Image (tube, rainbow, N blue to C red):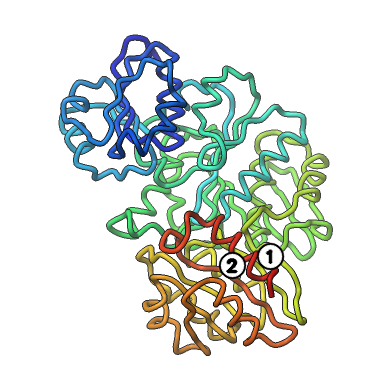
Amino acid sequence: MQLKDKNILVMGLARTGVAVARFLAKAGVRVTATDMRDETALSAVVAELNGLQINWKLGRHEDSDFLVADLIVVSPGVPMHHPMLLLAKQAGKEIVSEIELAARFIKVPMAAITGTNGKTTTTTLLGEILKANDLKTYVGGNIGDPLIELVESGEQVEMVVAEISSFQLEWISSFSPKVAALLNLSEDHLDRYATYQDYINAKLRIFENQTAEDFALVNRDDQLVWGNRSKLKAGLFPFSRKQELEEGIFCLGSEIVYRHNGQEERFPIANFRLKGVHNLENIMAAIGAALLMGCNPTNTLSAVEGFGALHHRMEFVREFNGVSYYEDSKATNVGSVEKALESFENITLIAGGKDKGGSYAPLADLVKERVRHLVLIGEAAGRMQQELGSLTATCHAATLEKAVQLASELTEPGGTVLMSPACSSFDMFKDYEERAERFIAAVKAL
């Protein structure tokens, strides 16, 4: 892709937009960077890109910038229906996401992981497996470093593993990973998408440009995922923890079994450090992708056995007065909380936060069956009370610290206090990490 002397507009200056602007400016592009935040709010960004030839349009978007651009690169945080993007699209302008731009320069095999839940664990684990197989690997995308930073660095790698969000897939046109994995689908981001189907359609775009030479790694147990298999052009490679497969990867008793083109490999699960049913699915997806990309089974098993849980995903905090405390702050949607509830019994659940627009009804059976006490916090507490409050003993807390104190008083020895919010954190906290840290501090202060 020829970049030099083109007029390229970068819309949105969060981390991805900054990385794109830096790459383009260094490549000799005439860059215009625009964001609705003003110079004061973006002073750190301007300082970071100091010395590069960039035309700053801060505190505003101007029609003319969008209409004269040869290419517009959109940050994931900008919705597709933004008026400026609609104007540019109507004028026939090419609009791409950062992953689309980066992929045009990446020439090595890529595994791309999407899904409502489990993306980060699966992506990180797959990266560790590839490295354990002595493959120089770049891990990035929605996790860690943007893909464009690999292109900018000029670093020579053999494999790329990318966590991909639905937002990043909205403006792709040729993005085509060698292995694309869709882990699961459940309601999420309905504050961004008009309908659940719009969200599903965005996720499915990860397979859009694959060919028969590529692989589509999909969850056989998720009916929404499996129901869309007829649309795939790549080789179908399912994973399942519920049924045996002739072709694919599945869990059979105490082993994970991989079958592909008449080859069979077995992986005992006894020494896995990652626990929980959701992690079994993540592990199968990572092993499946690794072996499809040519990894050695022995090295792969060794990497999986050495891999521990990521921060803020069903992380054990401490045991106090016979009660175990787990922090699952990354569980920002209902599907993620379902997996957490499946992993415990006799639960006091702390939930709530900023409502993302989806229904909490899918949690009903698990709440009724496993949750002894429900402690609600944040903006979503009222709606969660309406949908779930009648199913178990339910109360409200004004702060997370008060919720932890209340949970400690309500939970009997042998029980589990689980913070798994089913909501984003932005009503009360800077992000899910701050929410996690506050929970951990409150538990340790008991």
Distance Cα–Cα, label 1 vs label 2: 8 Å
Looking at the image, which residue is at 67% across and 42% down?
126
Q: To which residue does mark 2 refer?
A: 339
Confirm whether residue 242 shows in the render. Answer: no
Q: Nearer the viewer, residue 102 or 40?
A: 40
Residue 179 relative to residue 321: left or right: left
Looking at the image, which residue is at 52% across and 31% down?
147
Q: Disc 1 or 2, which lies upstream in sequence?
A: 1
- State the residue lying farthest toward the front: 40
Q: To which residue does mark 1 refer?
A: 276
Choose top left, top right, bottom left or bottom right for residue 323. bottom right
Location of the N terminus (image quadrant)? top left
Mark 1 surroundings within 10 Å by alpha-carbon count, few (fewer than 14), some (14 through 19), many (20 or more): some
Choose top left, top right, bottom left or bottom right for residue 11. top left
Relative to 359, say whether 211 is above or below: above
Location of the C terminus (image quadrant)? bottom right
Relative to 82, say whether 133 is above or below: above
- The amino acid on which the numbered mark 1 sits, given as a three-letter code, is Gly
- The amino acid on which the numbered mark 2 sits, given as a three-letter code, is Lys
Secondary-structure class at tag 1: loop
Looking at the image, which residue is at 66% across and 71% down?
443
Q: Nearer the viewer, residue 61 or 284?
A: 61
Q: Report x, y in % for residue 436.
A: 59, 61
Q: Nearer the viewer, residue 228 or 400?
A: 400
Looking at the image, which residue is at 55% across and 57% down?
434
The numbered disc on residue 398 is none
Secondary-structure class at tag 2: helix
Relative to 163, say whether 341 is above or below: below
**Circles 1 and 2 in contact, beta carbons < 8 Å:** yes
